[in-house]
């Protein structure tokens, strides 16, 4: 009888085990399909997991100053802002976080600026791990590359350039802070500030741990740290492709060989520089009789170039944003909406999208069949994508601004709310000071904008795709439609 009962229970346990194993496999497969079925979903999931880990670390008491309590929603907001290289925050970094919290912030900002997948791939290259087609597809998707060909060479050389430039910046900034003493700092504080600004500067994130909670206004009268920060912000915003080719060019020169820089690298670098110069002139004209009035010429020039360099991707400032005229705020909202270069640490619709939009409109106005520039015609697919990205981005920013204005009635103007939303979508970090006072729902909307701005509109849309490609199996008759 006892043996029969034992056998009976063994059979029951066996059936239960098989049932739960099947259930586990079914749930595991379902979750894997939801979060990791396509490269776009994999990228989103990696950033989401990293953000949650970062938020938890920032929320821990060891990360906070004595007597400070941080709501978990604020920890999530800050982690998203750091991983997306934005700079918006509901709290002061220096007043809220301890040294440990500051180090955690440096790591999150660095990971977000370089890209999680790029960092992992660089590690794989170092340890000699073979990188398969699936991994290469994920890397290419994160870096907005056309194909997987040469992707490992790209990220390896880009990583070399990035760490060299950051290393030079850290040494120069450490020495300057310690010797010039723009604020009171011993050697430890100088090194910490240099590391923090190197990570935030390259990542184009507007975070800082500087005293006074006034960003680079603490360096008033000190041009050198502002100039080298402008340089590293430019390097971070120009994109990994030009950085990789710059490394290959230097290697070739050392070997006595020639290396031809690609058209796309030249286009990204020149357009990035030209956009900076043009926006500097416009900003100067707008603010010369306002916030710049009565300032020395040297301070005006430094202000103009520093602020317009930061406007499209970073969020540092050396002049109060609240002093700007309404027209200047609108202009900077436009710059933040455009953002930096693709496969860079910046966000927004990206500079190349704006370039293709402009070139497409010119070609349409002149009745040209092709969109071309400098003797080269662009394919139809990227031109169509640029219009899609622009339309979706405008919709996201407008709807977000509208929702926040409904959630926060009669508190701020549409212009002020739109400025914050544009800053979030462009992952810039410039702010009029609204973020500490907005509600949880408004914070959630800003979080979505920062996340989408970082991973890109197309990646966000691609998350909805299934693994199998769908193509039209039937060709339908075409028809005209009235437009405009």
Image: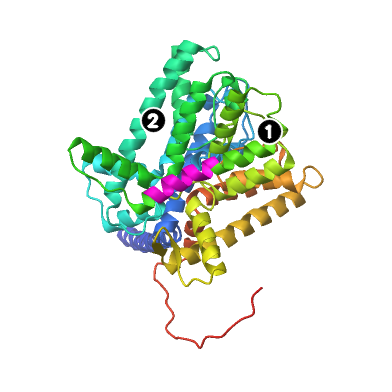
* Quadrant, the C terminus: bottom right
Left/right placement of residue 198 relative to residue 244 reads right
Residue at (50, 44) in percent of width and height: 274
For residue 212, above or below residue 86:
above
> Among all residues in the image, which is located at the extreme bottom?
477
Tell me where the magenta segment starts and ends, as one range: 266-277
Check disc 1 and report its element: helix, strand or loop: loop
Report the residue marked by disc 1: 288
- Is residue 80 in view from this perspective? no
Residue 434: percent from left, percent from top: 70, 38
Residue 309: percent from left, percent from top: 53, 37
Residue 238, picture quadrant: top left
> Crowding at label 1, few (<14), some or many (≥20) Cα neighbours within 10 Å?
some
Residue 255, picture quadrant: top left
Where residue 166 is drawn, which disc sits there? 2
Q: Is residue 40 magenta?
A: no
Residue at (67, 53) in percent of width and height: 400
Q: How many marks?
A: 2
- Is residue 47 in view from this perspective? yes
């Amino acid at each position: 009888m006892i043996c029969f009962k034992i056998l009976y229970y063994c059979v029951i346990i066996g059936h239960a085990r098989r049932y739960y194993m099947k259930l586990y496999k079914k749930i595991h497969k379902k979750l894997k399909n939801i979060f990791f079925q396509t490269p776009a979903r994999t990228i989103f999931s990696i950033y989401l997991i990293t953000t949650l880990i970062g938020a938890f670390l920032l929320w821990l008491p060891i990360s906070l100053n004595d007597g400070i309590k941080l709501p978990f929603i604020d920890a999530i907001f800050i982690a998203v802002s750091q991983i997306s290289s934005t700079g918006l925050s509901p709290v002061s970094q220096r007043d809220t976080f301890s040294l440990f919290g500051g180090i955690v912030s440096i790591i999150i900002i660095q990971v977000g600026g370089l890209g999680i997948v790029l960092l992992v791939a660089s590690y794989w290259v170092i340890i000699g791990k073979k990188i398969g087609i699936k991994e290469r597809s994920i890397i290419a998707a994160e870096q907005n590359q056309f194909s997987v060909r040469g992707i490992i060479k790209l990220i390896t050389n880009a990583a070399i350039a990035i760490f060299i430039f950051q290393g030079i910046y850290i040494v120069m900034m450490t020495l300057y802070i310690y010797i010039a003493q723009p604020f009171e700092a011993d050697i430890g504080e100088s090194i910490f500030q240099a590391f923090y600004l190197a990570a935030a500067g390259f990542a184009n994130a507007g975070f800082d741990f500087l005293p006074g909670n006034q960003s680079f206004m603490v360096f008033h009268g000190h041009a050198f740290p502002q100039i080298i920060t402008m340089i590293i912000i430019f390097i971070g915003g120009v994109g990994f492709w030009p950085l990789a080719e710059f490394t290959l060019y230097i290697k070739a020169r050392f070997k006595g060989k020639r290396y031809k820089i690609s058209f796309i690298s030249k286009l990204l670098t020149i357009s990035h520089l030209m956009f900076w110069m043009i926006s500097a002139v416009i900003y100067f004209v707008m603010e010369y009789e306002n916030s710049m009035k009565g300032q020395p010429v040297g301070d005006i020039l430094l202000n103009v170039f520093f602020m317009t360099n930061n406007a499209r991707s970073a969020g540092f400032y050396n002049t109060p944003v609240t002093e700007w005229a309404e027209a200047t705020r609108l202009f900077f909202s436009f710059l933040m909406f455009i953002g930096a270069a693709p496969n860079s640490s910046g966000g927004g619709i990206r500079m190349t999208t704006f370039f293709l939009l402009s070139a497409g409109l010119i070609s349409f106005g002149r009745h040209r069949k092709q969109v071309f520039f400098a003797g080269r015609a662009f394919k139809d697919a990227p031109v169509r994508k640029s219009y899609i990205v622009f339309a979706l981005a405008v919709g996201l920013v407008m709807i977000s601004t509208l929702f926040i204005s409904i959630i926060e009635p009669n508190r701020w103007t549409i212009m002020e709310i739109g400025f914050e939303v544009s800053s979030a979508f462009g992952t810039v970090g410039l702010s009029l000071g609204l973020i500490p006072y907005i509600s949880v729902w408004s914070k959630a909307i800003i979080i979505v904008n920062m996340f989408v701005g970082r991973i890109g509109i197309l990646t966000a849309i691609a998350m909805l795709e299934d693994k199998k490609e769908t193509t039209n199996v039937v060709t339908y008759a075409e028809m005209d439609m009235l437009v405009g």
